[in-house]
Image: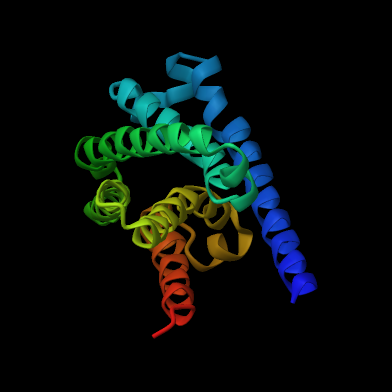
């Protein structure tokens, strides 16, 4: 039994380490350039008029991406309970900022592509916002198991931005859907709905009657 627990912890630690590495690479490659090169060439006409909203979205999402693995580490939580709580507050605030900025861009930036892209972004941003608000409400009510579940859901949606980039750049997906107008909305839905569904099945399956 002890070996099984140790093996399970090792697998979880490895998994969280991989997620942190992927999140770090994503933030470095996709977000940092917008902070380092604050000019119209980097943002292009598409984002320049709403650049501060994009900055808020990238900053909030990036912080949440990097903090997630630490928040879900049992070892980290048990050793640094006070830090865990403070980082949890930062995590929640970061997602609130990132999601609200995403909602704004879904209304005032995304329609330049098409209405399908706009709706896809809005629904995802709304799910992101509601998930983290539910996580906050559950911890305020001291419902720790439900809080953990909603934090997992919120982080899965956070990770969807990483998966979206991977899908959007995939040569296989580009061959199936050559134009971004059709590829973008499809990739967005796949990036968060399917992982969230799988996570939900796992969360419910593990529950005991």
Towards the viewer: 185 or 209 = 209
Give the side of residue 153 with respect to residue 66, left or right.
left
Using residue 103 as the reference point, say whether residue 172 is left or right of it.
Answer: right
Across and down, in percent, residue 17 comes to 69, 48
In the picture as drawn, the residue positioned furthest to the bottom comes out as: 209
Image coordinates for residue 66, horizontal then vertical, percent: 56, 38
Residue 51 screen position, x and y as percent:
34, 22
Is residue 113 positioned above or below 28 on the image?
Answer: below
Q: Residue furthest right?
A: 3
Q: How many marks?
A: 0
Q: Quadrant of the N terminus?
A: bottom right
- What residue do we see at 55% from left, 64% from top? 173
Q: Could you tell whether 66 is left or right of 183 in the image? A: right
User: Looking at the image, which is closer to me, 203 or 143?
Assistant: 143
The quadrant holding residue 53 is: top left
Instruction: Describe residue 43's horizontal placement relative to residue 104 as left or right.
Output: right
Residue at image position (46%, 56%) is 156
Q: Residue placed at 25% from the left, 37% from the top?
A: 100
């Amino acid at each position: 039994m002890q070996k099984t627990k140790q093996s399970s912890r090792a697998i979880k630690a490895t998994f969280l380490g991989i997620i942190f590495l992927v999140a770090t690479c994503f933030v470095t490659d996709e977000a940092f350039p917008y902070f380092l090169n604050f000019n119209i060439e980097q943002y292009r006409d598409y984002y320049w008029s709403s650049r501060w909203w994009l900055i808020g979205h990238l900053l909030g999402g990036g912080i949440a991406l990097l903090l997630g693995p630490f928040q879900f580490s049992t070892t980290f939580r048990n050793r640094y309970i006070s830090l865990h709580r403070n980082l949890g507050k930062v995590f929640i605030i970061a997602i609130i900022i990132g999601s609200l900025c995403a909602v704004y861009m879904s209304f005032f930036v995304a329609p330049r592509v098409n209405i399908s892209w706009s709706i896809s972004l809005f629904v995802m941003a709304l799910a992101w916002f509601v998930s983290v608000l539910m996580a906050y409400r559950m911890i305020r009510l001291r419902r720790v198991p439900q809080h953990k579940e909603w934090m997992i859901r919120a982080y899965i949606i956070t990770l969807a931005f990483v998966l979206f980039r991977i899908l959007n750049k995939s040569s296989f997906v580009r061959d199936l859907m050559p134009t971004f107008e059709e590829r973008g909305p499809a990739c967005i839905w796949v990036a968060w709905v399917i992982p969230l569904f799988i996570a939900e099945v796992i969360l419910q399956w593990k529950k005991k009657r």
